[in-house]
Image: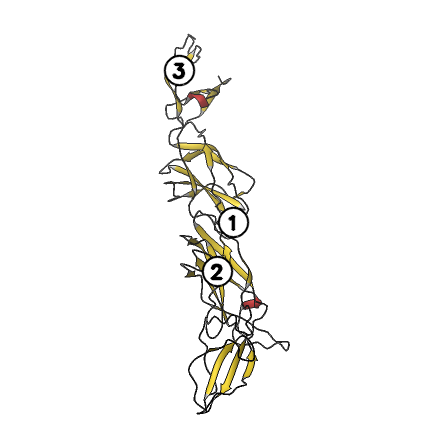
Amino acid sequence: DYAVYLSQNDGGSARSQVESFLIAGTYEVDIPPEHYHAPNTHVLIYTKSALTEQTTPVSINISDSDWSVSNVDFLDRDLDDDQLGGIITWVAPGEVDLVTHYGVYLAEDDAGGGRSQVSQELPYVLVFPDGSNRTGFLPEGTNQTELALHHEQENFTFIVVYTKSSLVEQTTPVSHNISDVLSIIPFIEFVDRDLDEEELGGDIEWLPPPDISQVTFYSVYVAWDPAGMQRSKIAGDVIVGTNFIHLPPEKAVESFTHVVVYTKSPFTQQTTPSALRISDTIASVEGIVFIDKDLDLYEVAGNVTWNGTGDLFLVTYYAVYFNSNETFDAERTRVEPDV
């Protein structure tokens, strides 16, 4: 028979048997995964007869290496609150002979509690000097995987990366604390300077987000609701550093109730915009009175009077015209100057 032990030295001091005696003709024994070997430093094998066990065993030194990755990194490129997305990277272990895969997860703590796998395990490439490689392929030799944009963060606070051999996955991962990039516009202002009812116009202004590290553009729309439903874009994207856009006058209100502004990176546009409810400014006149005091035919003179109504704080001048009908679509003549 054979007896296999773990020991603190090659002489069998303070040894512990791996399992029961093995019959002759058996030439291997499995040590189960996660077997804690400290303070043992050697594997000892004794032969055993029906009478007694060998006094001096054959020994081999235990080589227990750290197969962990290092420098796990993740830059969140999703601009929404409580949403994640971007590339997760890591550096391979110093020794990789036994590494076959990596497992990448979102987790609720740095030990991998409550984890959720980001993607399928990724095969590691071990390239030899002659250019050949062991089974498995990772494109371009990089160690990375993508977390799809708009992934709900939920209770996940860490990214954890495990190495895996052909036998088992690591128990203790290497972790990276998640920093959720939040690029939400805190304030929008729009004063409608088109004085007609059901028409809009004027400058839309906003304050930039506190974190613009991932922001390259702003996209501005009018929409049916604060979530951006049935939105209509106002001109092109606005480059970061510019915090306003001009809405040309006579933009029909239609069913639009809000101005919405999205932050935008090279990778994505926000899912949830910042929004401001539209207030349609109306300023008009009523009670127009004109008494012609020129007594000649085809000649007029006298005072035109009226009353202003509505949002008069935006009115700077009144323009007075003579017109050939009441529809305002005929040729008209301006009375100078504005008043």
Q: Are marks 1 and 2 in contact (CB under 8 Å)?
A: no
In the picture, measured across the screen, residue 69 lies left or right of residue 299, that is: right
- Element under label 2? strand
Q: Few, some or many C-alpha atoms within 10 Å of disc 1 (few <14, some 14-19, many ≥20)?
A: some
Q: Position of residue 247 (x, y in %)?
A: 47, 35
x 56%, y 62%: residue: 70
Q: CA distance from mark 2 to mark 3?
A: 74 Å
Q: Position of residue 140 (x, y in %)?
A: 57, 67
Q: Identify residue for label 2.
A: 160
Quarter of the view holding residue 191:
top left
Q: Identify residue for label 3.
A: 306
Query: Depth check: 213 or 26 in front?
Result: 26
> In which quadrant is the N terminus drawn?
bottom left
Q: Few, some or many C-alpha atoms within 10 Å of disc 3 (few <14, some 14-19, many ≥20)?
A: few
Quarter of the view holding residue 277:
top left
Q: Identify which amino acid the numbered label 1 is placed on.
A: Ser
Q: Nearer the viewer, mark 1 or mark 2?
A: 2
x 42%, y 45%: residue: 272
Q: CA distance from mark 1 to mark 2?
A: 26 Å
Q: Which mark is residue 37?
A: none
Query: Depth check: 126 or 109 in front?
Result: 109
Q: Identify residue for label 1.
A: 265
